[in-house]
Amino acid sequence: LQQVEAEIGAEKLTVVAHSMGNRLVMWSLRDRCENARCHGTPLSKLPDVVLTSPDVDTGTFKHYANDICENAQETWILTSGKDNALRASKFVHERRRLGMPGPDGVDIDWRQPPVVPGLKTIEFTVLDRGMVGHTIQHGLISDLARTS
């Protein structure tokens, strides 16, 4: 992430992660924020961070949400109610996954106060055409990033 940012600039870099890849992106964004604080330098904002079908424990995300969201103008969480892969992950880990929408379309576990500025959730169940429910068309993500 540092190398790509150095080559093209933070203002042109949209970060998109899927499933377990969200764990790596979250660690990287948390470290990016921490490094800026330690060095006393301003954190260059990325236009968007898009976390699709995140296979991440909701409590872990809540703990790091402010640092993750501080990295971008907007941070998006894309969820699907058809996501059988996250249901299996919840069974294995015995913890709710961030990509699992709640009854109102958002995961209420992490949405409790304090509200994290710049964080938005989109439930794309009706657009999810995958058999496992763990896919989103890249064109939808691209459209989201261009219109935000």
Image (cartoon, helix red, strand yellow):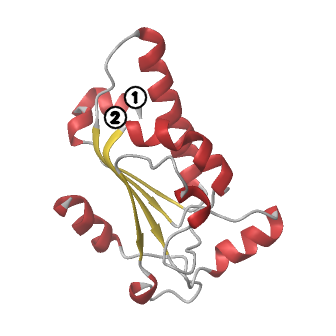
| Label 1 neighbour load within 10 Å: few <14, some 14-19, many 20+ | few
Instruction: Work out which quarter of the rendered image holds the N terminus and state it.
Output: top left
Q: Which residue is drawn at 21% across and 58% down?
A: 148
In this figure, which residue is indicated by the disc labeled 1?
A: 2
| Label 2 neighbour load within 10 Å: few <14, some 14-19, many 20+ | few
Residue 98 position, x and y percent, is 59, 62
Residue 133 position, x and y percent, is 55, 83
Q: In this rendered view, identify the residue nearer to me: 108 or 68.
A: 108
Q: Residue at x 22, y 68 (%)?
A: 143
* Image quarter of residue 78: bottom left
In this figure, which residue is indicated by the disc labeled 2?
A: 4
Whether the residues at callouts 2 and 1 have beta carbons within 8 Å, the answer is yes
Label 1 element class: helix
**Disc 2 marks which amino acid?**
Val
Residue 141 position, x and y percent, is 32, 66
Label 2 element class: helix
**Disc 1 marks which amino acid?**
Gln
